[in-house]
Amino acid sequence: MNTPPVPEGCPPCSVILNSWGWSRQGEGRRENEDAFLNWPERRCWAVADGVGSSAHGGEASRLLMTRLMDLPEPASLEAHVRNVRSCLEETNGLLTSRSLWPGSAASTIVVLLMHDAQAACLWSGDSRCYLQRNGRLYQCTRDHTLRQEKIDTGELTAPEAYRMIRGNIITQAIGAAAARVDEIRFALRPGDRLLLCSDGLTNILGEAKLNSLLRDGDNAHACAERIRESLDGYPQPDDATLIAVCLSPGK
């Protein structure tokens, strides 16, 4: 997994961007348990994927989006991150208390935030954020899964872990006890492209394909539609959701 570059001493870019998102229900699914928030005016984007083993995964993912939309406009990236962290912690408390619905309710989430020329990404679970820069794709997030845990501890190599039958078991999610939210920050550069997505997309399309589709689209809408079209012809047992965010290339 590539780590996104964090340039130092570089002049900030003017963050002029466009974004586009879509969600597709999996074949044979009772409902789409994914949800997304495309809010460029507030520099906030999020994708959530209801945990299938919970009784109310879809409700959990939609609740997360609703609560993010209630956040105040931030004065800085630090305030943006602080507000989102508080929101995720409070929602986790609501879901684990089981006061909203009988039975369990949990969801993965990935949130992208921007302020000026800086970005932050927060996540819990295996929904991902990618950064494409200068034709190279970087995975900003690190999956909270049993597979990734085995790789991190050195118990299995990456090829061995990807042969695990139940390697995609989620180890963190909002709505799980003591949910962990990880974070990464990085500087933005003109021409950067970012992709937020649920695992229903990444389980079908590999990183090389995603990199090509992001690179060749003229804008966020074109990138998102190219990815949607590329799914045609594949079996799609899981819900799939994405948001593409494209920064202007500058002058």
Image (cartoon, rainbow, N blue to C red):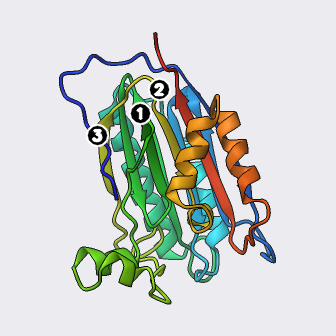
Residue 247: image location, x then y, percent:
51, 26
Name the amino acid, label 1.
Asn
Residue at image position (51%, 70%) is: 95
Q: State yes or no: discs 2 and 1 in contact (Cβ < 8 Å).
A: yes
Q: How many marks?
A: 3
Residue at image position (37%, 84%) is: 160
Above or below residue 219? Residue 126 is below
Judge from the rendering whether residue 214 lies leftward or rightward of residue 154; answer left or right.
right
Residue 242: image location, x then y, percent:
62, 51
Residue at image position (33%, 43%) is: 82
Check disc 2 and report the residue beneath it. 191
Judge from the rendering whether residue 100 lies leftward or rightward of residue 234; answer left or right.
left
Residue 199: image location, x then y, percent:
56, 65
Name the amino acid, label 3.
Pro
Q: Image quarter for residue 48?
A: bottom right
Determine the secondary structure under disc 3. Answer: loop
Question: Earlier along the polypeptide chain: callout 2 or callout 1?
Answer: 1
The mark lying in front, picked from 2 and 1, is 1
Whether residue 4 can be seen here: yes
Task: Check residue 95 in the rendering and tell me which mark sits there, or answer none.
Answer: none
Q: What distance separates the C-alpha of mark 2 from that of mark 1?
A: 8 Å
The mark lying in front, picked from 3 and 1, is 1
Question: Earlier along the polypeptide chain: callout 3 or callout 1?
Answer: 3
Check disc 1 and report the residue beneath it. 134
Residue 171: image location, x then y, percent:
40, 77
Check disc 3 and report the residue beneath it. 5
Q: Nearer the viewer, residue 62 or 101?
A: 62
Determine the secondary structure under disc 1. Answer: loop
Q: Nearer the viewer, residue 180 or 157?
A: 157
